[in-house]
Image (cartoon, rainbow, N blue to C red):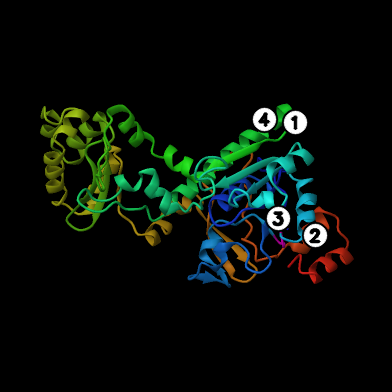
Amino acid sequence: MIEPSLAALDGIRILDLSRIIAGPFCTMQLGDLGAEVIKIEHPARGDDTRAMKPPEAGGESHFYLAYNRNKRSLALDLASEAGKAIIHDLAATSDVLVQNFRPGVMGRLGLDYETMAARYPGLIYCSISGYGQTGPMADRPGLDPVLQAESGMMSITGEPDGDPMRHPLSIIDVNTAFYATTAILGAIIARGRSGRGQHIDVALFDTSIAMLGNAAQFYLTSGEDPARHGNAHLAAVPVGLFHTADDPLYLALGNDRLYRTFCSEMIERPDLAEDPRFASNVDRNAHRPLLMKLVAEIFRTRPVEDWLARARAAGLPAGAVRRISQSIASPEVAARGMVDEVVHPTAGALRLLGSPMKLSATPVRAPSPPPTLGQHSDEVLREVLGYDEDRVRALREAGVVA
């Protein structure tokens, strides 16, 4: 059982009917902040990501392990009347319900927002879906790479003379989780004033559009589609990957002050700051190919560690292009506590990513390992709902609980 803490959401209970990334990452963040998260899973297969192997540890897939710390697992047959009754019992004691079934599924189960709100007016009900609960595509499944394509995100990703390219990480799922978490925290505050819950409708498609940010504003301002720039930046110059005498580095100079410092202190070419072709970011954009070629030639004259030392001394944003293994092993990851070790029931000692949220007065809770399927079924039924042993045994024998 997850030990109580003095974390920010201590005393808040989350009923988690979500799976894959967006929902589980949202509820994991709430769990990090101290909420009690009860994860409802299919009794035979569990969360879909449990099957996404290899690699695995102790029979658990790396994919599932990434998004499910600080939760308890209740394996429950939602299609059964007894299973639905358990969800109602849990909803009566919960503050937030999170689900990411396609629109209509929860209605067919009799667990839709309208039904639940009528019975539990204080319940905050968060629906996460591909295209939202309303709109012309509400009934479509939404997967991150398809949404990267449909939103226009892929059109600006990749080399200028190559094909549009998806981001390899599920960035829309992850950002949807952030929006859902933020909305839930806002709804908890609002409920403190009104005493009533509300429905939160978060869509991956909406998130993908919101993520376009300045790229969308480029179009809204100019009427033109922004072009692909590969490793360079849409507006700031010079930004990009540069090859040194040995390994590559990435440099990002977002304003004129940084560019002048770069010229005078890092590459010792003050003439490039004084050159009217490169004096402002507007000028540098107008002469982008020439400046990038000049900078590329300069970087090839020294090894990467030499350039990085110069960048650090000048306070400039530049970094080595690391592999994930190098990043995880870096001293800054250790110093910031971004990798935790837990003892997992089947995998033993297991390393997980840590939370990036650093709160001074209400720190995030120490991580508990992602649960095995149904690991806490009996515990939740007995301790949260007060079911006696005979009732729990009967539910298990009937296949309602696993």
Q: Are marks 1 and 3 in contact (CB under 8 Å)?
A: no
* Residue 133 in magenta stretch: no
Q: Which residue is mark 4?
A: 190
Between discs 3 and 4, the one toward the N terminus: 3
Relative to 295, residue 350 above or below: below
Look at the image and give the residue range highlighted in magenta. 74-78
Q: Which residue is mark 1?
A: 195
Residue at figure coordinates x 12%, y 48% from the top left: 297
Please state if 182 lies on the left or on the right of 123 as rendered: left
Q: Nearer the viewer, residue 306 or 63?
A: 63
Please state if 383 lies on the left or on the right of 257 as rendered: right
**Looking at the picture, how far across and down is residue 62, in whole percent?**
51, 65
Relative to 306, residue 290 above or below: above
Between discs 2 and 1, the one toward the N terminus: 2
Q: Nearer the viewer, residue 309 or 52?
A: 52
Q: Which residue is mark 3?
A: 2
* Outermost residue toward the front in this view: 136
